[in-house]
Amino acid sequence: MRVLELYSGVGGHRAALHLRTTTKDPQGTDSDASLSDTVTAYDVNEHANSVYALNYAHTPSTMDISLLTAELHLDAFDMWAMSPPCQPYTRNGPRLESADMRANSFLSLLKQIPLLKQPPPRILLENVLGFEKSDSFQLFLEILADCDYKTQGYLINSNTCGFPNSRPRFYLLAKRAPYVFKNPENNGKHDLVSLEGLTTNATANPVSNYLEVSANLDESLRISHRALWKAADQYDIVRPTHSRTCCFTKGYGKFARGTGSVLCMASDDEILEGAMQLGFQETSQAAASNDISCTQEAHANDNHNITADSAKARRTQIDWTGGHTPPHITAALDFLFDLHSTLRAKHKPIIDAAQSEPPKINPRTGEPVREKRISAKRKRALDMERGSWPDSLPPSPLSVLRLRYFSVREVARLQGFPEWFQFPEKSVLTNEQCWKLLGNSIHVHVVKGLMNYLLEEGS
């Protein structure tokens, strides 16, 4: 197999290719000898290339993919594997699609396919959901059809493959005649959600299967005092017994909302004890029922009653129920979140930091200058100037939960990377830099299954 790995990142496609035959570390083993000679990789990210080189003793080329032409032996490969930039197609962006400059390298690459004497027999593409509805995808399909390819598209989430991590992605598989798919009835379909031997209806493994004990002692992973007060209501919090985590993105560790889950290390007993020290009163009624009204009645004489809105918000944020958490612990959690919300609202300055500066006046017109969106960095600076209210408060009631980020190793495991896959020391790449690389990477287990199917010949 001669493989061209485009937008190679940390080498997720190569890891999937390697795991098709062995689980052994590729460094110094005969099993990866052929891969080291036949995998050609391209990526412009220096941090990603350093991780790639650490694992495969081979550094990808930093040549701009938009400069690749048919004359550069692009037809000397049995398979192309690629994950083009997703920003033009992601739902959180402007969705400029082909008009986005970040799509230029991919569009340029597509134009080279008809110019090749021998286009690659197989192509595997991974991208975010929404790519399959873009103009770039339609152009890709037209070029592939003109070059005698058959295509199949799959919308697969890794949590349907035994992993707790939710990572829904679109995958396009293409085969050029005379090669044919094992399931030709799927040709031309691009909304398939399952694949025999890969997806399953079984319950995903618990989060505990992917944790490392040493991470609980790593202070750099703890959610800070400031972060708890400022953004605790935005984190997605899971426990080791849960069987789901949110998709980890490149913003993990930097932003709280929608970037990945954080882990609660506290046991049931620790949660209950911490809540009782703060005024929670466990009653037989609260312990016997998980109903919100019972929880409200149990705390009717408390100054921090559980309101329907706060309880609903907490239950939306965290799925503590479903048989994982006893009712009286759920009641204690309701109390902690409500107390946190009450104290935060009481102490947070009424005037937002963004409004603390006097409006600027245009000297020519005498009218107020239209306000620009304040950056997170500037807002934090203004908060500090105004007394930095989170730093002046005692520990949040939610500190009882002992929240931490998932370690780099744990995130890699949740995304299917094998145990031998390494990252540089923190002095070389920080946690935030490694999380960013993983957020831009693929789910190795899913891609391995798709490669198996792509390389399997039909009759």
Image (cartoon, rainbow, N blue to C red):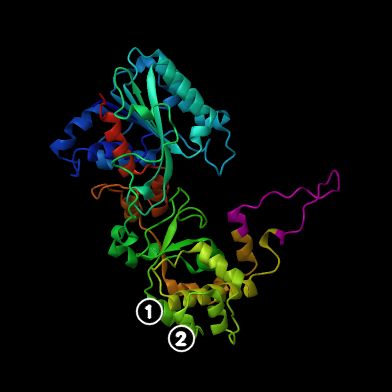
Main SS, magenta residues? loop
In primary-sequence order, the first of circles 1 and 2 is 1
Q: Which residues are magenta?
A: 355-379
Q: Which mark is residue 269?
A: 1
Residue 15 visible from this viewpoint: yes
**Horizontal arrangement in the rendering, residue 301 relative to residue 336 (left or right):** right
Instruction: Say which of 297 and 356 sits in front.
Output: 297
Tell me how many marks there are: 2
Where is residue 142? Give x, y as percent.
Answer: 47, 20
Residue type for callout 1: Asp
**Residue at the spot 43% in from the left edge and 51% down from the top edge:** 247
Q: Which mark is residue 284?
A: 2
For label 2, the SS is helix
- Residue at mark 1 to residue at mark 2: CA–CA distance: 16 Å
The picture quadrant where one finds residue 199 is top left
Residue type for callout 2: Ser
Which residue extends farthest left? Answer: 30
Residue 11 visible from this viewpoint: no
Quarter the C terminus occupies: top left
